[in-house]
Image: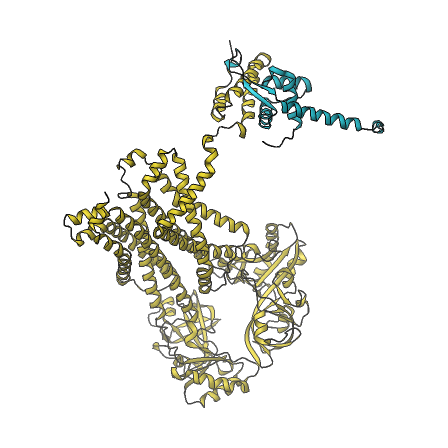
Amino acid sequence: MRGSYLGEFEELVLLTVGSLYKEAYGVAIMDEIEAQTERSVNVSAVHASLKRLEAKGYVTSYMGGATNERGGRRKRFFELTMNGKKVLDESMALRTQLYNKIPNIAYNFSY
Amino acid sequence: MQQQPPRWADRFLRWYCNPDLIEEIQGDIYELYEREVTIYSLRKANLLFIWNVMRFFRWSNIKKSNSKYQSNQLSMFKNYFVIGLRNIRKQWTTSLINVLGLSIAIGLALTTFIFIDQQLNMDSFHTKRNSIYQVINTVQEGDSDLARWGDSPIVLGPQAILDHSVIKDFTRIEFRYGNLRRGDYVFNEFMSFVDPSYLKMFDFPIKYGNRSALEEKKNIVIGEETALKYFGQEDPMGQQMSIKFSNGVIQQYVVGAVLDKQPDNASFGFEIMLPMDNFFDLRFKDNYDWAYFTDATFIELHEGADPRALEELFMSYKELQNQSDSRWTITDFELLSLDGLGTEAFDIQESVATAGHPAGRLALGGLSVILLLLACFNYMNIAVASATKRLKEIALRKVMGSDRRQIIYQFMLENFIQVVLAMMVGILLSYYFLLPGFSYMVPINVPFVFSSWGAMFGFFGTLLLIIGLLSGGYPALYISRFQPVSIFRGKEKFGSKSIFSRVLLGFQFFFAFSTIVGSFIFVDNANYMAKRDWGYDPEGILSIPVANSQEYQTLRKAAMEKPEIMSVTGTQGHISRNSTYTTVSRLDNDFKAYVYRVGPDYGHVMGLRLKAGRFFEKDKATDLANGAYVNEKFVKQVGWDDPIGKTFTYDSSRYNVLGVVEDFHYYTFWVDIEPVFFLMVPEEDFKYLVVKSEPDKLVEVDKYLLGVWPSISPNDPYDKVYQEDAMNGFHEENRANIVIISFIAGLAIILACLGLFGLLSFNINRRLKEFSVRKVLGAQSSEIIRVASREYVWVLTIAFVLGAPTGFMMITQLINMIYPDPKQAGALPFIIAILIVVVTVIITISGQIVRATQVNPSENLRAE
């Protein structure tokens, strides 16, 4: 397995996969990220991220059933794994921990 | 109605995309498309679709055709490598032939490359070479064609630096001969007057002293060799030296700096340098103006200056020069970068730089490439033939699941192993034999270095790639094509009747024949040239330069006392040592001729052969005033039927022709004989004493004269020349040509024979059973020899019929180009060439053929 480092975009995708739960596939993830962050994302970037996340063992995937849209092609759905959940928890904990350490003095922005 | 996205984009996606991923990727893109069609225009949706297809075109999504084999690719390569090494060991004769043939060719190519690389990168050690330019003039001389000259007006440099601020610095170079003396050591030396900036513009390495040495007017800068010659182990710095110039003036100098050994790729560089101001002090002329040309002017431009623009500005000097000298007029100025000096020098008259002619580089490069091709052909032929032994291996590999590509990889890899081996041997060959040998033959030193890392890696990379692909590609493609089924059923017969391999063999022998025939004609001609009559009698003649008539008289008296000396004469001009190339006119016909100003007995002593008329008579005033004798070419040039008593004009005086001598060669056979005429000079003008003795007594005479010399002329060197040595330069060059051309012919035939040997030994191995059966059925040995060698006899015959005339034509052209008056080629070179090739071929194949005749049928047939 490659290094377990989680990039910013990867983390975003991983969070989205978790939040979409059973409905996480390429276009849906893209739409969700666009809706939440208001930034434009290409679907190929989402695919590339998902592939990396899968290689790192943070998500698993399975092919869904046949559909009516998209020319009847199946969707590949993604799910968080235990490891994926753990890495999200860790990253969250780290952020909180660091955030709490910020002393009040730092808020005294003087322009 | 559903809209369809652009079909070509969809097809492109299906083409590149990994089949495992296609469904989800295509599905997502389609889903997006269906949505976008409803939101945007059809055009925009289509564009977005294409954009998405392009965005998915990344490495991780691209189809990898042989992904199934990925896991054991590496171990297969290891297997190929091991099998390759085993095969080399198993068929070591063939491998040896391959590697040897290739390595000779590679060694030669490497040697040639290093030579050409050096030639193309002359003067690269000068750090300012990109801002230094030599002023080259296009000159119109009389009615002759325009020519580029390295000489330029001596006042140009100082004038130009005043007029044009882009010029940073300049230096002129003026050549002179002088007698350099230090204590008892006196030698006639070639020296150059240069401007003080010379050492600062150029980066010649300095051993002792510093680069401002030439700023001191009385300093002399000498090279390492000169320092060793005059000072031995002593420290030369600060020592006194004196120089006596041709006008008798003696100047005193102090050694200001000693240069280190010149870099091997210096196209010019001098042993003795003097500050320019001393040249003007010598007063060879009262006034140096635009009419006086110095040997070279180099200018250094400021950073970023445009030399082309400066050339235009220089045109204003054209008028000045043209007014000063109407017979020798500059029509154009050119600033030649120091970077290009080495490669352009061949085209410039009297260039300070010495550099090879591009024709030599082309010829050598071409020959190396051809020899390399021959070696590759060898490899191809033998590789294809040797694959007959490995048909079953190939078939088995295919049955076990190898595809064609893998068989190709395997054979290419085996080939690369051999090429790399050959390359290593070739490098050793070049380093220890070829390059030192070549360097010895040519007048310059060629060290085993590349001009840059890029050149080195470029050369080896290209070589590896070209040889590997060329010689390994065909066998690999050919062998990998066979079907296992037909191999196992024994249907596949190949190698035996391959037209291609015969064409290759034929080409090898075509080249071998043409070079052999060519080299024999060349060597024959070169030998003929070396033994040619000189047109006079050089044996037993010795010449010594004298400074004045008093020296001449004393030396002459001393010479007369020696009984071995048969005759003594004095002269100003001397064949091979001193003549002037000038213009003479007859009526309104101007032409160029050499003039020798000689003493009255000169013609007799030198053994010039009178065809008509007479030489000079000693006390005849009219002979001295306007007598002349000329050579046959002179007569031919003018078109006289009866030249005696006719007149011509030279230097605004009219001369009567008293006699005609046979044409003679002055110092080399390379050049055509030109018109020559002799004029008589009085004793005061004699520059040489010429003595003639019995040829075997000449050394004794030389010793005697050397003994008396110091008492006669302590300031001048005893600078004798044996007349027989006059053509030494020619003979050396001739010998070098013979060696190089014979060597290449030898290589060509060795390579061809290696190829023949390899091919033959395989074919005989393959046909051992056939020969056994023939024997059992009662074939004689002669019959078997005939059958075994039949196909090669045809190939050789065709190669000879085509090759010999080609070689003949090409070498005749070459000879006509370099020798003015060559010998007509006879039948002998052809006969010798055939003999040589036949003998080598017989030696090469006899062992194999004998093996074929001595097969033991019971052994060969029992196996099945």
**Residue closer to the observer: B537 or B569:** B537
Height in image: B143 above or below A23?
A: below
Residue at horizontal 41%, vertical 49%? B418
Taking the image as shown, residue B121 lies to the left or right of residue B777, namely right
Colour of chain A in the rendered structure image: cyan
Height in image: B356 above or below B773?
A: below
Height in image: B74 above or below B251?
A: above
Residue at horizontal 60%, vertical 19%? A79
Question: Total marks drawn?
Answer: 0
Taking the image as shown, residue B222 lies to the left or right of residue B5, namely right
Residue B292 location (% of width, % of height): 58, 66
**Residue closer to the observer: B379 or A85:** A85
Residue B220 seen in render: yes
Taking the image as shown, residue B580 lies to the left or right of residue B245, namely left
Colour of chain B in the rendered structure image: yellow
**Residue closer to the observer: B820 or B693:** B693
Residue B77 location (% of width, % of height): 45, 40
Question: Which quadrant would residue B247 be assigned to in this image?
Answer: bottom right
Height in image: A52 above or below B270?
A: above
Residue B22 location (% of width, % of height): 50, 22
Taking the image as shown, residue B507 lies to the left or right of residue B220, namely left
Residue B244 seen in render: no
Residue farthest along the left direction in this orientation: B778
